[in-house]
Image (cartoon, rainbow, N blue to C red):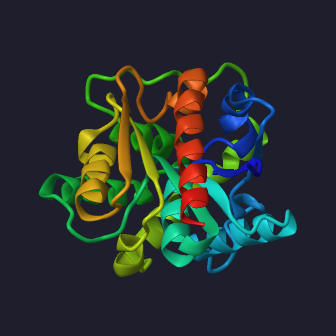
């Protein structure tokens, strides 16, 4: 069997290595894992014309540079939205897809509660930076969740880019054409990981919609004590690593069986 090759895309806040370092360690040396930073943060400001297509192109360049014709793709939050877009655009390159609470999954078939929530996300864009991040985090969890305080000391230099980056995601979600028909034809295994304390009108709604409308081989795994800002890949990496091993090994076996 060929080695299992995986590209991990982070969310719009943490860089890839601190986001996925614990999980990659838990996966062990037999997994060829790449924690790839978002193209969004390659410079001091979002690249002109940036969209999810920019992230798709970045994943292709990285995979091609490594000689990976096919691979597994994992995406969290904004990176999860980019992973979905990649699956719609280049399904032939993927062996499986893992979605860790993707921030967005198309603009169709929204529930009324999800539509109301996105009106609140749009209102964030007018806030100053010091108010933006706390308000953004509050929308992602259930009302009674106590959010973690900021780490002590001055923020890392990369943090200054994050409000503009998050706003770029929110902006591209308004207009990006996620190809519904091509996404519906994606037949590879899909694992969706959900925190039970995340906002059910956001990530829970996305999980239900994707399971209902798409993906014939779809598995939902819920982590009861987790939410979007203490996600399983950072807080429970050993349990998630076990799930991923099963997910990928099943996909690899399916590929061999179908030739």
Tell which residue pokes out farthest to the left in this image: 112
Query: Is 156 on the left-hand or right-hand side of 173?
Result: right
Closest to the observer, 228 or 212: 212
Residue at position x 25%, y 71% in the image: 108
Tell which of 53 and 216 is nearer to you: 216
Q: Is residue 172 above or below residue 212?
A: below
The image shows residue 20 at horizontal and vertical percentages of: 68, 37
Residue 148 locus on image (x, y percent)? 49, 22
The answer to whether 131 is drawn above or below residue 93 in the figure is above
**Which percent across, then down, holds residue 202?**
30, 48
Tell me the quarter of the image containing the C terminus. Answer: bottom right
Can I make out residue 120 in this image?
no
Residue 121 can be seen in this image: yes
Q: Closer to the camera, 175 or 122? A: 175
Q: Which residue corresponds to the image point at 40% horizontal and 59% vertical from the top-left?
A: 104
Quadrant of the rendered structure where residue 193 is? top left
In the rendered structure, the answer to whether residue 12 lies left or right of residue 159 reads left
Residue 205 lies, in percent from the top left, at: 25, 50
Which residue is found at the position 45% from the left and 46% from the top? 191
**Hey, which quadrant is residue 54 in on the image?**
bottom right
Q: Is residue 132 above or below residue 197?
A: below
Q: Is residue 43 left or right of residue 112?
A: right
């Amino acid at each position: 069997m060929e080695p299992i090759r995986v590209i991990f895309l982070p969310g719009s806040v943490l860089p890839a290595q601190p986001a996925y370092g614990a999980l990659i360690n838990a996966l062990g040396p037999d997994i060829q894992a790449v924690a790839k930073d978002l193209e969004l943060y390659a410079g001091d400001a979002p690249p002109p014309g940036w969209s999810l297509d920019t992230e798709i192109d970045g994943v292709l360049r990285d995979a091609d540079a490594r000689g990976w014709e096919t691979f597994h793709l994992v995406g969290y939050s904004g990176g999860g939205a980019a992973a979905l877009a990649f699956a719609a655009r280049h399904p032939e390159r993927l062996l499986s897809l893992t979605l860790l609470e993707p921030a967005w999954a198309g603009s169709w078939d929204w529930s009324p509660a999800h539509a109301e929530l996105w009106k609140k996300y749009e209102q964030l864009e007018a806030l100053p930076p010091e108010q933006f991040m706390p308000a953004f985090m509050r929308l992602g969890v259930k009302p009674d969740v106590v959010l973690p305080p900021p780490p002590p000391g001055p923020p890392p230099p990369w943090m200054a880019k994050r409000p503009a980056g998050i706003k770029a995601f929110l902006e591209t979600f308004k207009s990006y054409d996620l190809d519904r028909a091509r996404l519906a034809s994606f037949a590879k295994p899909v694992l969706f990981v959900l925190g039970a304390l995340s906002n059910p009108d956001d990530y829970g709604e996305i999980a239900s919609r994707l399971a209902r409308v798409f993906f014939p081989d779809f598995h939902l795994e819920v982590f009861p004590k987790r939410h979007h800002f203490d996600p399983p890949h950072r807080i429970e990496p050993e349990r998630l690593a076990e799930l991923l091993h099963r997910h990928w090994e099943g996909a690899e076996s399916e590929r061999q069986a179908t030739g």
